[in-house]
């Protein structure tokens, strides 16, 4: 996670944005006491949104936890996809 001030961000905006995208970084721009902005790549945002959606219900959360446990115990199995 990177941090900077708004002034430094303005000076090197391209460098910061390239670093965020290329290195999967998150940038916090401080804007005063307890105030700031977070910048992340679209890929990171989409990943966080998908995770939030998958964990949005207790049923989904239990299903995912169960699948992880089965995988860790070695009791999972692989299926081939059917292509049309």
Image: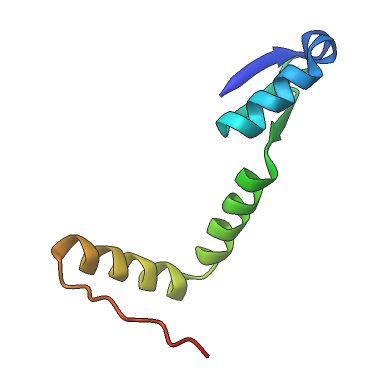
Q: How many marks?
A: 0
Q: Residue at x 51, y 70 (%)?
A: 57
The residue closer to the viewer here, 78 or 30, is 78
Can you give x and y, in whole percent of width and height, for residue 66 in the image? Answer: 29, 70
**Residue 27 visible in the current orientation:** no
Q: Residue furthest front?
A: 84
Which residue corresponds to the image point at 19% horizontal and 60% vertical from the top-left? 72
Way the structure is coloured: rainbow
Query: As displayed, is residue 45 above or below residue 29?
Result: below
Decide if residue 80 is on the left or right side of residue 29: left
Toward the viewer: 30 or 21?
Answer: 21
Instruction: Name the image quarter holding residue 58.
Output: bottom left
Q: Quadrant of residue 22?
A: top right
The answer to whether residue 6 is visible is yes
Q: Nearer the viewer, residue 2 or 65?
A: 2
Tell whether 80 sits left or right of 26: left
Q: Position of residue 14 (x, y in %)?
A: 78, 21
Q: Residue at x 81, y 14 (%)?
A: 6
47 over 81 or under it: above or below: above
Identify the residue shown where x is 65% and y is 34%: 21
Q: Position of residue 24 (x, y in %)?
A: 57, 34
Measuring from the top left, give residue 11's x and y in whole percent: 83, 9
Which quarter of the rendered picture does the N terminus lie within?
Answer: top right
């Amino acid at each position: 996670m990177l941090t900077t001030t708004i002034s430094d961000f303005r000076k090197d905006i391209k460098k910061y944005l390239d670093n965020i995208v290329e290195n999967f970084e998150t940038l916090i721009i401080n804007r005063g006491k307890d105030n700031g902005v977070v910048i992340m790549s679209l890929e990171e945002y989409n990943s966080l949104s998908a995770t939030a959606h998958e964990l949005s219900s207790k049923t989904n959360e239990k299903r995912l936890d169960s699948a992880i446990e089965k995988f860790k115990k070695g009791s999972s199995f692989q299926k081939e996809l059917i292509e049309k």
